[in-house]
Image (spheres, rainbow, N blue to C red):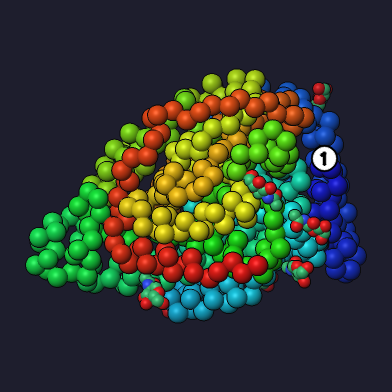
């Protein structure tokens, strides 16, 4: 399986795709040999964890690279600039900066063309093809590692990966278009702050400043004077984008794309700073089968779970941290590090075949979950609840929908041993330079190497738990009081799923 895929990736585009000269053939043969040797190493030692010992506590990029197969290094390094050209010209130093108009035109072009790359190699999208949708902002370093993890996953060649962007960037596009191990599509959120820097949904001149009172706002007569959030704060554009993008993307994928017109299978939601285990697709199929037989009420399958010891924005802490972040925009995420005690993780794989059935809880189950069109259509019919709930978090909004509108509440099947990890140590709102930290990546690599023997279980055992009172719905987190946000969100819902 593994062999078939890897050989196909490397050989097809070079040797079969275009018949060329002898030099091309030589390259192909060389690559084939490299792959072959690589496969030998990996097939023979796939389930042995012998190499874990060599890698001590070393989080350097060298160490990280050493755990990535050579053929995938291309996804981790940016294409070297042509040096000789730089030396001879003053102009090539700065790449052409696209204007906003050019970006908008490109976005429109991409979105209307709906090109599926690599369909010629991997065949067309079927009605049960697993579709992986990745929400992407600007964190290129993490995205590179996510792509590397996807490249190593078994069955990845049968999927369609949809990259959904809210920031247009040539380097990110180049990376995405270099993905050669699955079918790929790019979609671009058209209402981004990047393309609307001085107008809604970006910040517009007439907006009320976040911290003035409703009385002050009335005197100023600013645009949104009447609609502060639950906590008396006015809209901040950059905190609204993620929820808008999430909703737009779900609508786009399920209701608007031509390629998904007949699709009835699973759609898996990932984000740019996730990292997958190599058996995540195997697990997803297993969960789907298990749900059909043993848990008809399960309508959402979750591959990731936050661990007790991995306190990533635990509820109370999250709000506190976000408040701190809002007060001092300069405070970096380093001030609120996820406390990761990864030593505890490997023992989780004692539970490698265990899954829990539980009501879906936004803060616990928002990472790497999958659902199908029939579940989506129920969510979609509750658009008003999603779009008008005063919380700028899409996941809390979904939970609100589940608890107040759905006739079948979201019931999750959650893997006890996670197959999706969160590698981001920086939030979406931080500068690129602060987000190069790869410490967690190295730890996840080690955890997965340790757990290699436990991957690919043949069956799952389910435990049923009823929700704890703690997760009862509470007041929203605010940040979503402006009627323009409600309206935009509802507007994005309108294209009907006429199927
Ligand atoms: C980490 O690994 C690199 C290359 O393998 C090595 O140069 C460096 O000294 C190591 N650092 C530590 C702290 O072991
Ligand atoms: C670099 O630029 C030179 C001059 O433009 C060109 O001849 C050469 O092929 C380029 N090299 C690469 C790797 O693109
Ligand atoms: C770069 O530009 C400067 C000033 O325009 C000029 O003097 C210099 O010769 C240029 N260098 C190259 C390598 O073209
Ligand atoms: C998927 O397509 C196949 C063949 O085209 C068809 O037999 C099957 O019923 C379809 N499945 C669903 C769930 O629509
Ligand atoms: C969807 O199904 C219809 C009817 O079977 C077919 O004509 C159409 O080509 C299919 N579209 C896609 C994208 O598969
Ligand atoms: C979609 O998921 C629901 C809930 O799990 C399930 O009842 C339904 O059969 C699924 N639909 C398809 C086409 O698999
Ligand atoms: C939503 O759509 C309505 C009707 O087309 C339009 O008047 C309004 O400006 C739109 N609002 C936003 C925020 O896009
Ligand atoms: C390259 C490598 O690590 N090979 C090892 C594969 O596993 C066998 C047995 O576990 C070892 O003898 C090899 O050295």
User: Measuring 71% from the left and 63% from the top, which residue is drawn there?
Assistant: 262
Mark yes or no: residue 59 visible: no
Left or right position of 50 against 26: left
Where residue 134 sits, quadrant-wise, is bottom right
User: Measuring 25% from the left and 50% from the top, which residue is drawn there?
Assistant: 230
Q: Is residue 66 above or below residue 211?
A: above
The residue to which callout 1 is attached is 39
User: Measuring 74% from the left and 29% from the top, which residue is drawn there?
Assistant: 459
Left or right position of 189 against 149: left
Task: For mark 1, give the secondary structure.
Answer: helix
Left or right position of 2 against 79: right
Q: Nearer the viewer, residue 10 or 461?
A: 461
From the image, which quarter does the N terminus lie in? top right
Where residue 186 sits, quadrant-wise, is bottom right
Q: Any atom of ligand 8 within 8 Å of the CB at mark 1?
A: no
Q: Is residue 463 above or below residue 131?
A: above
Left or right position of 78 against 200: right
Image label count: 1
Q: Position of residue 239 (x, y in %)?
A: 35, 55
Splitting the image into four quadrants, where does ligand 7 fall?
bottom left
Q: Residues within 10 Å of mark 1 (few under 14, many from 20)?
A: some
Mark yes or no: residue 3 visible: yes
């Amino acid at each position: 399986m593994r062999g078939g895929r890897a050989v196909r990736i490397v050989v097809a585009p070079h040797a079969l795709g275009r018949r060329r000269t002898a030099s091309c053939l030589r390259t192909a043969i060389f690559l084939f040999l490299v792959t072959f040797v690589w496969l030998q190493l990996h097939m023979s030692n796939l389930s042995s964890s012998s190499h874990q010992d060599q890698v001590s506590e070393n989080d350097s990029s060298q160490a990280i690279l050493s755990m990535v197969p050579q053929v995938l290094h291309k996804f981790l390094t940016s294409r070297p600039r042509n040096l000789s050209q730089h030396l001879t010209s003053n102009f090539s130093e700065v790449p052409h900066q696209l204007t906003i108009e050019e970006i908008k035109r490109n976005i429109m072009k991409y979105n209307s063309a709906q090109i599926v790359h690599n369909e010629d190699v991997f065949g067309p999208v079927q009605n049960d093809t697993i579709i992986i949708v990745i929400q992407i902002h600007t964190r290129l370093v993490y995205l590179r590692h996510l792509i590397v993890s996807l490249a190593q996953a078994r069955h990845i060649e049968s999927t369609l990966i949809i990259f959904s962007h809210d920031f247009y960037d040539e380097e990110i596009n180049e990376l995405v278009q270099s993905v050669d191990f699955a079918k790929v599509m790019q979609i671009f959120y058209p209402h981004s702050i990047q393309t609307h820097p001085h107008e809604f949904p970006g910040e517009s001149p007439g907006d009320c400043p976040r911290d003035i009172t409703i009385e002050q706002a009335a005197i100023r007569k600013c645009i949104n004077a009447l609609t502060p959030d639950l906590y008396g704060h006015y809209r901040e554009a950059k905190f609204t984008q993620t929820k808008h993008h999430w909703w737009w993307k779900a609508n786009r994928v399920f209701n608007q794309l031509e390629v998904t017109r007949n699709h009835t299978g699973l759609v898996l939601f990932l984000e740019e700073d996730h990292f997958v285990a190599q058996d995540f697709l195997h697990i997803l199929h297993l969960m789907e089968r298990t749900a059909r037989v043993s848990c008809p009420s399960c309508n959402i399958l979750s591959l990731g779970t936050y661990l007790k010891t991995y306190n990533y924005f635990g509820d109370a802490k999250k709000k506190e941290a976000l408040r701190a972040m809002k007060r001092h925009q300069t405070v970096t995420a380093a001030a609120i590090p996820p406390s990761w005690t990864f030593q505890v993780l490997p023992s989780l794989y004692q539970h490698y075949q265990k899954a829990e059935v539980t009501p879906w809880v936004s803060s616990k189950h928002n990472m790497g979950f999958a659902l199908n069109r029939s579940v989506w259509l129920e969510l979609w019919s509750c658009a008003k609840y999603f779009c008008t709930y005063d919380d700028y978090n899409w996941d809390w909004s979904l939970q609100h929908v589940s608890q107040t509108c759905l006739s079948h509440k979201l019931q999750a099947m959650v893997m006890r041993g996670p197959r999706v990890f969160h590698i981001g140590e920086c939030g979406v709102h931080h500068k690129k330079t602060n987000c190069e930290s790869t410490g967690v990546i190295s730890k996840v690599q080690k955890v997965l190497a340790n757990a290699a023997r436990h991957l690919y279980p043949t069956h799952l055992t389910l435990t049923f738990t009823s929700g704890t009172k703690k997760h009862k719905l509470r007041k929203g987190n605010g940040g979503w009081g402006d009627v323009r946000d409600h309206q935009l969100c509802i507007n994005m819902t309108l294209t009907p799923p006429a199927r």
